[in-house]
Image (cartoon, helix red, strand yellow):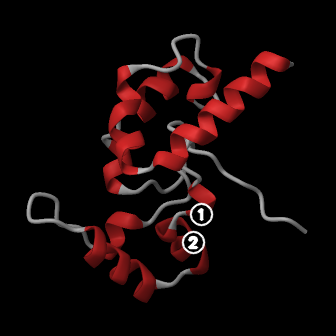
Amino acid sequence: MAEEKIIAFCGILCSDCPAFKATLAGDEEALAKQAAEWSSDEYPLEADDLLCDGCIYEDKRTATFCLDCDVRQCALERGVENCAHCDDFPCDKLEKPWAMCVDAKTTLEELRQMLKGS
């Protein structure tokens, strides 16, 4: 059985994210390692900050930095599956996540093309 892909509002594949995978596996060591890798002086992270079941859900665990995400807040308010489904796609809110993950942009652009074709 193939693993279901979970696509964040910004196009990042949650199901490929190391924090998501570690959360599902209950792997506290992997979460701690990822927190150390992603931490900065301005934004220190602990393993618990990375517990995440996917940012697209309001009623599940979401990584701390995703709770503050403008893209996530906008998509939740608009009730879209992800930004590819938004009438205002693409918008300036996507610049920051896309700068961190170029694949996210590609994912949403491909989804948008499929939606236009249907």
For residue 83, above or below residue 44? above
**Residue placed farthest to the bottom in the image?**
29
Single out the mark in the foreground, 1 or 2: 1
Residue 55 seen: no
Mark 2 highlights which residue? Answer: 21
User: The disc labelled 1 sits on which kind of residue?
Assistant: Asp
Mark 1 highlights which residue? Answer: 16
For residue 22, above or below residue 81? below
For the residues labelled 1 and 2, the Cα–Cα distance comes to: 7 Å
Please provide percent x and percent y for residue 5.
71, 54
Q: Residue at 50% x, 26% y: name it.
A: 75
**Residue placed farthest to the right in the image?**
1
Residue 13 seen: yes
Picture disc at residue 5: none
The N terminus sits in image quarter: bottom right
The quarter holding residue 37 reads bottom left
The quarter holding residue 72 reads top left
For residue 116, above or below residue 51? above
User: The disc labelled 2 sits on which kind of residue?
Assistant: Lys
Q: Is residue 100 left or right of residue 3?
A: left
Please provide percent x and percent y for residue 22.
52, 76
Q: Residue at 52% x, 38% y: name it.
A: 105
Query: Is label 1 in contact with label 2 (beta carbons under 8 Å)?
Result: yes
Please name whichever residue, 35 or 49, is drawn nearer the observer in this view of the structure.
35
Q: Residue at 45% x, 54% y: name it.
A: 62
Please provide percent x and percent y for residue 101.
44, 50
Secondary element at tag 2? helix
Please name whichever residue, 22 or 104, is drawn nearer the observer in this view of the structure.
104
Q: Residue at 36% x, 26% y: name it.
A: 93
Q: Is residue 84 left or right of residue 28?
A: right
Of callouts 1 and 2, which one flags the residue occurring earlier in the amino acid sequence? 1
